[in-house]
Image (tube, rainbow, N blue to C red):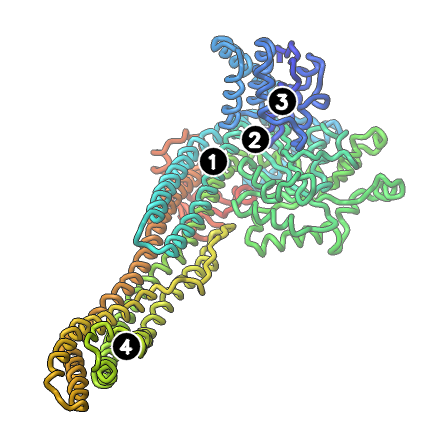
């Protein structure tokens, strides 16, 4: 860069904004560090000596981002211009300014004193300098470890082998070695940009559609909360279902946005990511490839940053990740480390030592394969040949480590990896290369200069490097399409299948609820009718006993009283009439109550356990807890029927007794005999009560039945409402889930057609400019139902001449033309 920072900040924390722009995407690009270092030297500091070190290493002790912004705001205008310029350069050195970087740059500018005119000048200058820096430094790789003739010869030989396979015959003459590698990389970038222009609106459509569905479900969920006619348990279940779907879809949206950002960042570059355990050889590998970082290899020198490191080599972008399953990952899980690079990687390289293949490596293979991405297993031989005795033994037979037979040796490990991948159904995705990285590293050291060539050649690193070059030169364009188009298909497919899988139990449960709804309402209706008849029978029997037996006892007790109107309620209470009748009615209602309670309890239990066991969205926790024993008996109010019936049993008697008392009082004076007076009074009271009860008993019994019917119908309606609301809630969720899955499927079908068109273009050496019309005219149908196979129906001319064998080892699926 021609411009260099000139003014040291007054507050060192101001430099922190440069650190945060570097790590804002959880990656540290070597270009950024290399460009920043001389600028810091110009103002008398360095990364290691400033607040930048802790920020870039992601340490807890790092100054907070807010503090760096506050410090920047206090600087004078000249310092702010310097820092703002450097901020913009750093944000553009890794290719693209994404949304996170734009937001932070905007936030920094809002704290500055820089005028709009000056801001524009600085931005133009920074953009120009960043591009110039990339072009100057992103050069072809030249390996100083190997004599140039040997390296060229090896590359020629690999090209001959590939060319022979392409032509279907063995060639005597060699293809030209005047391959314009840079133009090939540029062509890959052009294809990538075109493909990105295809997937970008697909991502946007999916995100918009999912967001709209979530907004609808959120409004529906809130309407449940405000509803007065839905039970709390139903609201809880429906809302929990909705929360689970929402959480998953929101996560999918966030992952989609992150994946889109990753893809955009790597459009100009073919990208290789290095994954592996600590000390497996990742740092050694990138040092060998880039001729940089040898000084950081060795005990105690492993980096501890939680961020990925990015390097440029041979016009290729290499991402070195923290070691999985170790403290080096700084708290990140293995999945998080892998996910941080998968979206932007054309090839994933797992660096594995040959002493053991641990489960976490196999799990990583599964994860990478799940999105149809090629996997290179770099099987690094573990042997310390720095030991003089071992070194002499090694030099005497430098290929022995690779050629030895036996399960514990290299080939045994290769066989186990291949067998595992085959068992998992993705053997075609995996390529295994045995290497001896320590030997390659030692070939660069002065101490072993005499054996430089032997060390390098025996390391077998050239087989890996040449394969990478072959992939880029001969199949880079289709591999870029695989990364951008096919990987998007796989990501969308995972989300689509999750929604479909989650919908299956919901759909089944809706059907079950609908059938159960009808059956149980019919069952309760029958129980209601039986209960009504039983209550009427009990009521009649009890009232007849009251009229025939209890009324006589009452009359004998009160015949002497002048006013007996208030005696009847007390008598009924004393003989326990109300309690007995209530108990008898409750007994008759108990079957209905038990049946209704059982239906509701089983309904909630069924929904709950289906949510727990069948709601098939990975990593979703359903936080619903129901104490089924404490669910309120929804039919409890039916017991109040007894009270309503008791009113009919007691109140009509009161006014009759008032009249009887008067009649008895008037008639008693005409009766001379004491016994006769007594008998007359008792009979009068008894007959009057008995007649009063029995004369209207049929009518009162029917009313009792009607009262029971009203109460029990309310409970049936409650059960009916619970079913209706559950079915409605699940149906609303399924409706929105269907809308989301249909959008995913639509985008998958379109992207499959574009990918198929790219395949046809690759096989026919076509360079047609992309257009939607051209894709639809050329590709009529794509079938990917069978795993690992793409069936394409095309109108392309000379379809029979398209040699699908050219795709073997290039893309992961077998291609068949229909």
Q: Residue 126: name its quadrant.
A: top right
Between residue 569 and residue 793, name the one nearer to us. 569
- Sort mark 2 into few (<14), some (14-19) or many (20+) by Cα contacts within 10 Å: some
Q: Of the residues under marks 1 and 4, which one precedes in the sequence?
A: 1
Q: Mark 2 falls on what kind of element?
A: loop
Q: Of the residues under marks 4 and 2, which one precedes in the sequence?
A: 2
Looking at the rendered image, the disc whose residue lies closer to the viewer, 3 or 1, is: 3
Going by the picture, which residue comes out furthest to the right? 389
Q: Residue 674: name its quadrant.
A: bottom left
Q: Is residue 647 above or below residue 53?
A: below
Disc 3 and disc 1 in contact, CB within 8 angstroms: no
Judging by the rendered image, the residue that carries numbered circle 3 is 16
Q: Of the residues under marks 1 and 2, which one precedes in the sequence?
A: 2
Judging by the rendered image, the residue that carries numbered circle 4 is 571
Q: Of the residues under marks 4 and 3, which one precedes in the sequence?
A: 3
Q: Position of residue 657 (x, y in %)?
A: 17, 75
Q: Number of callouts in the render?
A: 4
Residue 602 makes an appearance in the image:
yes
Name the residue: 38% across, 54% down.
232
- Sort mark 3 into few (<14), some (14-19) or many (20+) by Cα contacts within 10 Å: many
Looking at the rendered image, the disc whose residue lies closer to the viewer, 1 or 4, is: 4
- Sort mark 4 into few (<14), some (14-19) or many (20+) by Cα contacts within 10 Å: some
Residue 25, numbered label: 2
Distance from the alpha carbon under mark 2 to that under mark 3: 15 Å
Distance from the alpha carbon under mark 3 to that under mark 1: 27 Å
Can you say which quadrant of the picture contains the N terminus? top right
Distance from the alpha carbon under mark 1 to that under mark 2: 13 Å
Q: Of the residues under marks 2 and 3, which one precedes in the sequence?
A: 3
Distance from the alpha carbon under mark 4 to that under mark 2: 87 Å
Q: Is residue 329 above or below residue 103?
A: below
Q: Of the residues under marks 3 and 1, which one precedes in the sequence?
A: 3
Judging by the rendered image, the residue that carries numbered circle 1 is 257
């Amino acid at each position: 860069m021609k411009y260099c920072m000139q003014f040291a900040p007054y507050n060192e924390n101001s430099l922190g904004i440069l650190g945060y722009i570097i790590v804002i995407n959880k990656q540290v690009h070597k270009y950024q560090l290399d460009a920043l270092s001389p600028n810091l030297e110009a103002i008398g500091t360095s990364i290691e000596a400033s607040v930048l070190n802790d920020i870039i290493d992601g340490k807890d002790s790092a100054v907070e981002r807010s503090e760096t912004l506050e410090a920047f705001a206090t600087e004078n205008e000249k310092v702010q211009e310097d820092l703002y310029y450097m901020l913009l350069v750093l944000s553009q050195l890794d290719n693209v300014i994404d949304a996170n970087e734009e937001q932070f740059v905007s936030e920094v500018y809002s704290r500055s004193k820089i005028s709009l005119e000056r801001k524009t000048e600085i931005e133009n200058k920074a953009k120009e300098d960043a591009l110039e820096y990339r072009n100057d430094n992103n050069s072809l790789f030249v390996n100083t470890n190997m004599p140039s003739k040997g390296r060229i010869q090896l590359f020629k030989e690999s090209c001959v082998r590939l060319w022979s396979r392409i032509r279907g015959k063995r060639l005597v003459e060699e293809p030209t070695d005047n391959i314009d590698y840079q133009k090939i990389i540029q062509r890959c970038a052009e294809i990538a940009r075109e493909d990105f222009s295809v997937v970008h609106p697909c991502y946007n459509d999916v995100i918009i559609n999912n967001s709209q569905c979530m907004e609808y479900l959120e409004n529906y969920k809130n309407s449940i909360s405000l509803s007065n006619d839905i039970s709390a348990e139903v609201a809880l279940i429906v809302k929990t279902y909705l929360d689970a779907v929402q959480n998953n879809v929101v996560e999918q949206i966030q992952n989609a946005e992150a994946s889109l950002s990753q893809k955009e960042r790597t459009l100009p570059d073919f990208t290789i990511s290095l994954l592996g355990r600590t000390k497996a050889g990742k740092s050694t590998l990138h040092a060998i490839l880039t001729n940089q970082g040898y000084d950081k290899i060795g005990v105690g020198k492993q980096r501890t940053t939680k961020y990925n490191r990015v390097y440029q080599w041979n016009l290729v972008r290499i991402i070195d990740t923290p070691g999985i399953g170790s403290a080096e990952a700084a708290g990140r899980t293995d999945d998080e480390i892998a996910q941080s690079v998968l979206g932007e990687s054309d090839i994933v390289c797992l660096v594995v030592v040959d002493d053991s293949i641990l489960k976490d490596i196999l799990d990583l293979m599964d994860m990478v394969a799940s999105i149809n991405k090629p996997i290179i297993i770099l099987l690094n031989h573990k042997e310390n040949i720095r030991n003089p005795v071992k070194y002499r033994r090694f030099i005497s037979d430098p290929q022995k480590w690779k050629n030895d037979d036996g399960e514990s040796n290299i080939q045994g490990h290769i066989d186990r990896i291949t067998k595992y991948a085959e068992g998992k159904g993705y053997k075609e995705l995996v390529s295994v290369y045995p290497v001896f990285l320590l030997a390659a590293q030692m070939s660069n050291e002065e101490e072993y200069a005499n054996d430089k060539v032997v060390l390098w050649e025996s390391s077998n690193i050239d087989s890996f490097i040449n394969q990478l070059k072959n992939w880029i030169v001969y199949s880079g364009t289709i591999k870029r399409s695989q990364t951008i188009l096919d990987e998007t298909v796989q990501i969308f497919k995972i989300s689509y299948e999750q929604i479909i899988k989650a919908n299956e139990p919901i759909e089944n449960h809706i059907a079950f609820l609908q059938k159960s709804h009808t059956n149980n309402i019919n069952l309760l209706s029958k129980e209601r009718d039986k209960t009504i008849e039983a209550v009427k029978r009990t009521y009649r029997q009890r009232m007849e006993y009251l009229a025939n037996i209890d009324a006589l006892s009452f009359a004998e007790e009160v015949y002497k009283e002048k006013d007996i109107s208030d005696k009847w309620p007390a008598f009924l209470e004393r003989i326990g009439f109300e309690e007995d009748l209530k108990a008898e009615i409750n007994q008759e209602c108990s079957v209905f109550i038990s049946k209704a309670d059982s239906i509701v309890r089983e309904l909630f239990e069924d929904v709950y356990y289906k949510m727990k066991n069948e709601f098939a969205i990975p990593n979703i926790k359903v936080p619903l807890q129901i104490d089924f024993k404490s669910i309120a008996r929804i039919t409890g109010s039916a017991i109040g029927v007894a009270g309503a019936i008791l009113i009919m049993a007691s109140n009509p008697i009161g006014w009759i007794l008032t009249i009887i008392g008067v009649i008895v009082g008037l008639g008693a004076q005409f009766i001379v005999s004491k016994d006769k007076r007594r008998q007359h009074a008792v009979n009068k009271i008894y007959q009057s009560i008995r007649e009063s009860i029995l004369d209207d008993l049929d009518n009162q019994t029917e009313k009792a039945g009607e009262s029971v019917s009203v109460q029990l119908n309310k409970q049936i309606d409650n059960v009916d409402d619970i079913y209706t609301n559950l079915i409605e809630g699940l149906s609303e969720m399924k409706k929105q889930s269907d809308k989301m899955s249909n959008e995913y499927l639509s985008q998958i079908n379109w992207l499959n057609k574009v990918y198929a068109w790219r395949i046809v273009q690759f096989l026919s050496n076509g360079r047609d400019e992309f257009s939607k019309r051209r894709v639809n005219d050329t590709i009529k149908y794509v079938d990917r139902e069978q795993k690992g196979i793409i069936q394409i129906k095309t109108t392309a001319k000379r379809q029979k001449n398209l040699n699908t064998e050219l795709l073997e080892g290039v893309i992961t699926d077998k291609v068949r033309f229909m």
